[in-house]
Each structure stands twice: as structure tokens, then as C-alpha cells.
């Protein structure tokens, strides 16, 4: 059990470093973002129209039955957007996000370790296969769902999908090194 817990912590650290490289050092994912012509004006408009923290759908929620016809017409005429407003301001590199990101990595790796235990994985190839299947399922459900249901442009959504796929596979392989059963020594045979 101690080896597994050590493996979870070590894997979470490696995953954290991988995240930093993928999202912090590499600039390629951000090249898919569209430039904002007037950031200050856009921020002012966001503050004016979206006063509370939350997620907004423009032209409105399909659940708004009182204005259903107007919303349907606005959807057809466009533009359509989903806006996430997270705060009135924060540091660009927020320490609390870094800390909670590491905790998230710990939870992901612990869940992966649980999957390995439940599946009875014992050899390295078991961990490699299970992490691949888990990664593909997660990417199809989460990232594929975002592209389909929430209409995230593929040019952006592909980057979280690539990250999620690689992160889960990487975590599974590293965790597998800790969790695999040791081969019996010659003296034990």
C-alpha cells in the first residue's frame, strides 16, 4: 500500500511538471485563440453585461420557456456564445490555482490507481492498456462532448483533448511502474 501511495504522489508530481510544460512553457496551444482587438473595451463590456460569477449562454438558456421563441430566433441569427465569468480579477499566475491543480492531479492519479486495483492490473502492460482506454474514454466524453454539445471550436478544443489523452496515458505508465507486481526472485522459485 505504501508503494502505491508513493506512486500516486510521485505520479502527481510528474503530471504537474508535464502540465507546466504543456500549458506554461509551450505556446502552441494558445496560437489557436483568436486575438481580441480591444481587451480593455471587451473587459468593460463583460463587466457591464455579466455582473456575477457564473456561466452565461447568449442569446439565452434553452430552459427559459417564457422567451423560447425569441431565443430560438436569436440562436438562428447568431452569434451564439457561452461565456464563463470567473472573477473580478486575479493574478495571471495565481498560486491558488497552481495548488488546487496539484490537488486535482492527486485525485486523478488516485482514481487511476483505484481503476488499476479494481481491474486487477499486475503487469506493466495491464497499466499501459488500462490507461490508454481510460484516456480515450475521457477524451471522447469530455472533449468530444465540449466540441459537440457546447460547440467549442475544434481549433481550441483539440489542445485540451491532446493534453488529457497524453496526461492520462503518462500517469498510467508512471503509476504502473510503482504498482506492478515484482517478478519473483530466483531464490523464491
Image: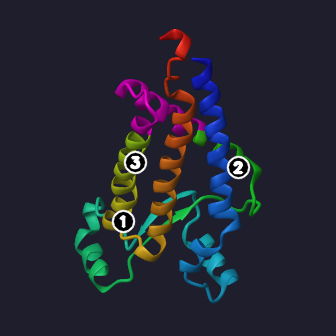
User: Local crowd at mark 2 within 10 Å, few (<14), some, or many (≥20)?
Assistant: few
Residue 16: x and y, percent? 66, 48
- Label 1, label 3: how many angstroms apart (C-alpha)? 25 Å
Q: Nearer the viewer, mark 1 or mark 2?
A: 2
Q: Quarter of the image for the N terminus: give it.
A: top right
Picture layout, residue 154 above or below residue 161: below
Residue pictured at 66% horizontal, 69% vertical = 26
Circle 2 sits on which residue?
A: 98
Q: Which mark is residue 124?
A: none
Q: Residue at label 3? A: 132
Q: As drawn, is 63 to the left or to the right of 108?
A: left
In the image, which residues are magenta? 106-127
Question: Which residue in the protein does label 1 denote?
Answer: 150
Q: Residues within 10 Å of mark 1 (few under 14, many from 20)?
A: few
Q: Main secondary structure of the magenta part?
A: helix
Residue 33 falls left or right of residue 39: left
Residue name at image x 40 percent, y 60 percent: 143
Is disc 1 placed on a helix, strand or loop?
Answer: loop
- Measured from the top left, where is residue 172 in percent x and y? 49, 41
Task: Sort mark 3 into few (<14), some (14-19) or many (20+) by Cα contacts within 10 Å.
Answer: some
Amino acid at each position: 500500500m505504501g508503494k502505491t501511495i508513493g506512486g500516486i504522489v510521485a505520479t502527481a508530481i510528474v503530471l504537474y511538471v508535464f502540465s507546466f510544460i504543456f500549458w506554461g512553457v509551450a505556446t502552441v496551444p494558445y496560437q489557436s485563440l483568436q486575438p481580441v482587438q480591444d481587451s480593455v473595451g471587451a473587459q468593460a463590456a463583460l463587466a457591464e453585461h455579466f455582473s456575477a460569477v457564473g456561466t452565461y449562454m447568449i442569446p439565452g438558456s434553452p430552459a427559459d420557456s417564457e422567451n423560447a421563441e425569441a431565443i430560438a430566433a436569436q440562436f438562428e441569427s447568431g452569434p451564439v456564445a457561452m461565456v464563463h465569468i470567473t472573477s473580478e480579477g486575479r493574478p495571471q499566475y495565481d498560486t491558488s490555482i497552481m495548488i488546487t491543480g496539484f490537488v486535482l492531479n492527486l485525485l486523478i492519479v488516485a482514481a487511476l490507481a483505484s481503476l488499476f486495483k479494481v481491474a486487477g492490473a499486475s503487469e506493466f502492460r495491464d497499466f499501459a492498456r488500462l490507461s490508454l482506454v481510460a484516456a480515450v474514454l475521457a477524451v471522447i466524453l469530455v472533449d468530444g462532448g465540449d466540441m459537440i454539445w457546447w460547440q467549442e471550436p475544434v481549433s481550441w478544443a483539440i489542445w485540451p483533448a491532446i493534453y488529457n489523452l497524453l496526461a492520462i496515458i503518462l500517469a498510467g505508465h508512471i503509476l504502473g511502474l510503482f504498482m506492478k507486481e515484482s517478478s519473483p526472485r530466483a531464490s523464491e522459485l
